[in-house]
Image (tube, rainbow, N blue to C red):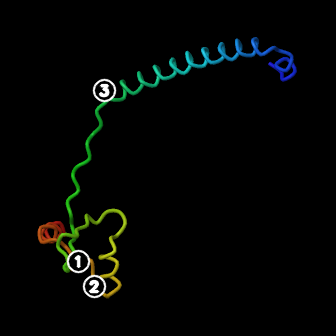
Amino acid sequence: MESKQLQSMSTDELWDLYEKVDSTLADKLQAEKAKIEERLRRLEGQVRRPYPPVHPKYKNPRNPTEIWSGRGKQPLWVREQLRAGKKLDQFLIAESRRRSRAEG
């Protein structure tokens, strides 16, 4: 609908048009919502392979509660220790150290 047509309509005609547009839009949104919900239900039925748990591989010698798996961004304590000249192998947790020797 062009602007000139809207300008020539009375307030009552515009209000009726607004109500029709509002109702039509609400119906279409409800239909889209139903489609999306159905897609989500189908996706929930598909089982994904779970990722195995990632165990910590390194721990901070100054604070043993600070651990790191070796994945992702290095924690601040690792970066500080490496800058101080230490090697990453020095922070291996005992179990990880045994595994890496057996693999190597």
> SS for tag 1?
helix
Q: Are marks 1 and 2 in contact (CB under 8 Å)?
A: no
> SS for tag 2?
loop
Q: Position of residue 70 (x, y in %)?
A: 28, 66
Q: Position of residue 17 (x, y in %)?
A: 71, 14
Q: Amino acid at mark 2?
A: Lys
Q: Amino acid at mark 1?
A: Asp
> Residue visible at 16% across and 67% down?
96
> SS for tag 3?
helix
Q: Position of residue 9 (x, y in %)?
A: 82, 14
Instruction: Quickly name the residue at label 2.
Output: 86
Q: Amino acid at mark 3?
A: Gly
Pick the front one: 94 or 6: 6
Quarter of the image holding residue 48? top left
In this rendering, the label closer to the viewer, 1 or 2: 2
Pick the front one: 25 or 77: 25
Instruction: Quickly name the residue at label 3.
Output: 45
